[in-house]
Image (cartoon, grey):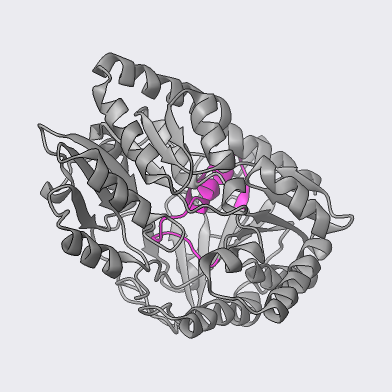
Amino acid sequence: MCAGANLRPRVPAFHRARGPAALATGADAGRPGLGGGLLACVLVVRVLIVSQHFWPESFRINEVAASLVAQGADVTVLTGQPNYPEGRVFPGYRAWCVQRERHVDGYEVLRVPLVPRGPGGALRLVLNYLSFIASAMGFGLWLLRGRRVDTVFVYATSPILQALAALWIGRWKRAKVVVWVQDLWPDSLVITGYVRSPRVLAAVAAVTRFIYRRSDRLLVQSPAFMAPVQAMAGATPVAVHENPGDRDAPLQPLPEGLRKPADRFTLVFAGNLGTVQALETVLDAAEQAGPDLVWMLVGSGARSPWLAAEVTRRGLGDRVRLPGRFEAALMPALFAQADALLVTLNRAPALAQVVPSKIQAYLAAGRPILAALDGEGARVVQASGAGLAVAAEDAAGLATAARHLQSLDEGRRADMGRAGRRYFETHYEPTQSAQRLMAQLQSA
């Protein structure tokens, strides 16, 4: 077991546990306001979250864990060593360590070894996925020895295969297993282009069907997921539980590289710059929309090198800004200064069923949204009244919509932002979402 390097002082959300004495004991350990007195009689739900990705990586499950603790759950997180999206293990962590951490919100994080994603390539990605599954089954079960678990809750981003580890742990712990499906498999493999072999896709579909049918409950992040998941789930109950937004946080000062030009209309995209984000469409729209608009693409991903080279090749350096990846704590201030917030996806049937999690963050920010995507994501933008949506990969439509937003007066754009915020509070507010999730976990 690794002693672990000290976390950098600029990262305040965790402190590393130093041996057994540093770890609080009991269901209410480390959670102020619980434990003792009459509250000791309250039934506490012991939830083990299994997720390959977790803080300091930026994923929605970070917020969900904190919200479940606030609802009174005794939460433990089983995850890997953070290395997404750059493929390099974060400072303060080591790829082959087994570590325990205590989050300031009162839950324990158990980290198991894995092969980092590295700079890219399908083989390295497969090793990254499989190493986490194997480590979670072995090291994870060892870290959980002597610990009671009521429900194993899987944050099932790609790959869904990580749920195999949860089923294994659930069997040993005699716990219910609830899988929160974030991506449709094997459809996601087809979209990203990683797998094209019909035999491999059929095998993945068989494993997915196995996972679904041996889970106690399946939750899906979008209403459009219901039919395809139910078709594979057999008798397993399926329900919709949409991704929540983040809790409100104070705005932090932005570094120079993230500040918008004072005299130009600026659209901000924040998140993964990968294979499904329709980045060609964004560049085409930037060319067509004219020089008085700035497209700020904040983040990193598999297509970052291509994107930087293409911006240079097209001579778009003054219109398309690529400041890089920044910590999640800066995003509220980044969104607040934007004239509009941008979300794009490729054209694909499976992607039309997804609501990208950045939409919740955009709605919470109270700024207008400009979307180029199909299906559920577009429906949310339009139903909320928060902005404009055009078809996926429609560069001309995106450019026209961007110019239209620019032409509106600030009062009209502010109305869009307020409408989006109201929709967020009704559908994605994290406390209400956690209450609904707790009900699902308790009834599994």
Q: Could you say which quadrant of the image residue 223 lies in?
A: top right
- Could you tell me residue 72's position as x and y percent? 61, 42
Left of 205 or right of it: where is 434?
left
Question: Is 421 above or below relative to 353?
Answer: above
Residue drawn at x 32%, y 46% is: 269
- Foreground residue among 392 and 341: 392
On the rendered structure, is 35 left or right of 100? right
Observer-nearest of 399 and 221: 399
Point 42% across, 39% down: residue: 371
Indicate whether residue 198 is drawn in magenta.
Answer: no
Q: Is residue 429 visible?
A: no
Query: Number of labelled discs?
Result: 0
Q: Is residue 203 above or below residue 209?
A: below
Residue 184: where, in percent of width, then height?
A: 65, 58
Q: Residue furthest right?
A: 235
Nearer to us in this view, 309 or 230:
309
Does residue 359 sit above or below 405 in this rendering? Answer: below
Give above or below for 190 relative to 318: below
Whether residue 59 is visible, yes or no, is: yes
Picture quadrant where residue 97 is located: bottom left
> Measuring 12% from the left and 49% from the top, which residue is drawn there?
318
Residue drawn at x 25%, y 35% as measured from the top left: 338
Residue 58 at x, y percent in the picture? 41, 56
Magenta-tinted stretch? 52-74
Q: Position of residue 45 (x, y in %)?
A: 70, 49
